[in-house]
Image (spheres, rainbow, N blue to C red):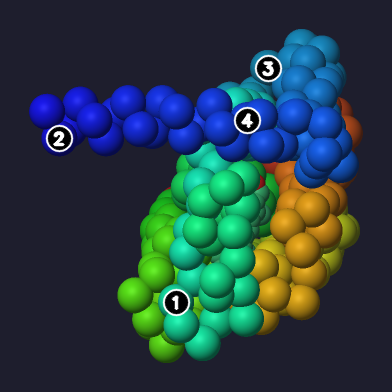
Amino acid sequence: FRAQRAVLQNGAADRELFEYVFGGDNTLLALSFVLNIALAGITILAIAYLGRHLTDPRSKAIATALMLISIVSISSYTGLTSGLTLGVVEMPPGHPAAGATTAGQDGVLTMWGRYLTWTFSTPFILIALGMIAGSDWTKILTACAFTITMCVTGLAAALTTSSLVLRWWWFVLSTIFFLVIVSIILVDWTAEASATGTADLFRTLKLLTVVGWFGYPILWALGVEGFAVLDVTVTSWGYSILDVITKYVVTFVAMLYIVDEPDAITGGADYGTSMPGL
Ligand code: RET
């Protein structure tokens, strides 16, 4: 009975939050979700179109990883839009937003679906980047493992209501995992991209990724869940704009390069012999 009641309450909660966001007073917030559904859809179609003549298995694998970023994204933003992955979370004592109310409930609006779905989208960004750099699967999967851990601890930071110190401790843990990823990109993959012959493309992708990814923890710290300097709408637009850079812009830059199937991407005639583990 208790479980049933929890399900029913949740059923009502997603409807309440949907009405809160789309009920007319929060149009800007609603737009920050809907815009990304449109952009993810366009990106998926564009990859299918641009990649229609690809033949090489490595080029196809990179294009598939790129497409999966937007496939996760369209699902993620549908979750936020429907209210299913939104929640009202009460902040612990001492937090600047402690005592706030949202949609008639105690707490602040938390877009926890974002942190959850980054767990699934960021690995595909790293798979695409790692393959473009010509890295090995040990490093690519290490980066993926760290991004999953980073996102899950970020989710924990957002949902912890027991203590302010523990919220920030989750944040510190997540940031440490983030720095491991940054070092793999800046040190390992940069060197490997030079050896592979994709240094030019990788430099652009690296810049977009590293600068863009740093925006997320900064926004978290400044947003309602951190120091509460920015309100929910500004925070949400911040994440939506960062998503445009780190997902769709990265995808188009990579895709436009890959369609020509240069040797450096396909592995060339020597693929599988001269670069073991590629
Ligand atoms: C959080 C808060 C805790 C500390 C850190 C964070 C980093 C998040 C990042 C997210 C990147 C998301 C992307 C999504 C695209 O789909 C979780 C905000 C370090 C780097 C690129």
Residue shown at 42% from the left, 88% from the top: 165
Q: Nearer the viewer, mark 2 or mark 3?
A: 2
Question: Which residue is labeled 3 in the image?
Answer: 55
Q: Kindly indicate whether the residue at mark 3 contacts the one at mark 2 (C-beta within 8 angstroms).
A: no
Label for residue 92?
1
Question: Which residue is labeled 4 in the image?
Answer: 18
Residue shown at 56% from the left, 32% from the top: 16
> Is residue 38 placed above or below 190 in the rendered structure?
above
Name the image quarter holding residue 34. Answer: top right
Q: Is residue 259 visible?
A: yes
Q: Given the image, on which type of amino acid does mark 1 rest?
A: Pro
Q: Earlier in the sequence, mark 3 or mark 1?
A: 3
Q: Given the image, on which type of amino acid does mark 4 rest?
A: Phe
Q: Earlier in the sequence, mark 2 or mark 4?
A: 2
Q: Given the image, on which type of amino acid does mark 2 rest?
A: Arg
Residue positioned most to the left = 1
Residue shown at 34% from the left, 75% from the top: 162
- The picture places residue 170, in percent across and down from the top left corner, at 42, 76
Going by the image, does 58 lie left or right of 234? left
Dot 4 beta carbon under 8 Å from ligand 1: no
Name the image quarter holding residue 248. Answer: top right
Cα distance between the residues tagged 2 and 3: 55 Å
- The picture places residue 137, in percent across and down from the top left corner, at 44, 52
Question: Which residue is labeled 2 in the image?
Answer: 2
